[in-house]
Image (cartoon, rainbow, N blue to C red):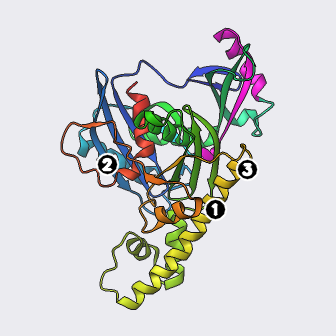
Amino acid sequence: MRIIFNGTIMALKLGIGSKTGVGVDIGSNSIKVLELSKSGRKYYIDALDIIDLPAGAVSGGTVNDGASAASYLKSSFSKLGISEKKVAIGIPCKHVIIKTIEMPKMKAKEVDSSIYYEAQRYITYDMNEVFLDYIILGDSPNDAGSNLIMIVAGKKDIIENQMDFIHQCGLNPNIVDVDCIALENMFNFNYPEEFDELTAIIKIGASETNVHVLQKGVNLFRRDIPIGGMNITEEIAKKFQIDVNEAENIKIGNMGNRGGDFKADYSIYLNMILSRVTSEIQRTIDYFAANNDKQYPKKVYLTGGSSKLPGILEDIETKINIPVVSINPFRNLLFRQNIADDKSHFFAVAVGLALRGAE
């Protein structure tokens, strides 16, 4: 990949990729670490970890408390025995503009020299405040003499903030990806049988819910819904007048010694909150279909830290009338050792990042 920085092309992926890839997914509530190694055509999970962060350490993709977060990440690498210093990180999709355009077929050097000026027609950010990259997707279906090119423009301050944090940890961010692209790459790797099908991926994360529609390995549509697990926790805390830590414990099923009346009230309230999330998902899928010849995805794949909340999968399936299943990001990966994978739904992005590093 490349980044265009103030008109100068510089390498985004530095050095030659090793057969070991380490993905570091920096989220609002936690950092997910996953190390993969490649042997022949097989990929192995060597280590993984979820690092819970103090409130406010990371918000909206920005690392606010680098010293604290760095100490946690260093301890995780030490505990896991990860010696690889080159890591792949992902920038939240909401800080990135992604556009697919058509350009006449030309030599690689000609694309490099013209993409910056072409991108100015599509990127709404100040071009001096972004890193710009592109990927040639292949032939245009509309013009045999043109290529489809995906342009990616990421906010420079967010990228530099995360790179500075990784350097603070004594690591080298040799790959900077985008969360949503890493998620899609993970899916394409694990579910190759869905390549030709119109398929949706829904990631319910800490701060937002992302809806993707794919076909033939290419993204056709993305939408970010500004509701996530943290919003749900905060609403629970406000409703029942408890602190957010207690609300988070209740959300993940730790009710303690609370009685039946509380559990009944909580269940009703949680279902009401989740219904708002699933209704937004329904509207998003309907919007895509309305603008694409009434084509609906054949199947929906669900992931993210809040995707395991009780009833959410079934509610989505009922509303959109499409089969919904949970993604297994470890589906085509092997384990080097006996590693607990009961929290696999947290690692979809980290797997996509680590796969890039192990290419």
In the picture as drawn, the residue positioned furthest to the left comes out as: 338
Residue underneath mark 1? 280
Which badge, 2 or 1, is on the more N-terminal residue?
A: 2
Checking the image for residue 49, the label placed there is: 2
Type of the residue with mark 3:
Ala
Few, some or many C-alpha atoms within 10 Å of disc 2 (few <14, some 14-19, many ≥20)?
Answer: many
Few, some or many C-alpha atoms within 10 Å of disc 3 (few <14, some 14-19, many ≥20)?
Answer: few
Which badge, 3 or 1, is on the more N-terminal residue?
A: 1
Quarter of image, res 355: top left
Say which element carries label 2: strand
**x and y, in percent, of residue 62 in the image:** 55, 50
Residue underneath mark 3? 290
Quarter of image, res 145: top right
Mark 2 or 3, closer to the camera: 3
Type of the residue with mark 1:
Glu
Question: Which region shows up in magenta?
Answer: 93-119
Residue at the image position 72 percent from the left and 43 percent from the top: 293
**Residue 60 makes an appearance in the image:** no
**Whole-Å distance between the Cαs marked 2 and 1?**
31 Å
Type of the residue with mark 2:
Asp
**Nearer to me, 325 or 350:** 325
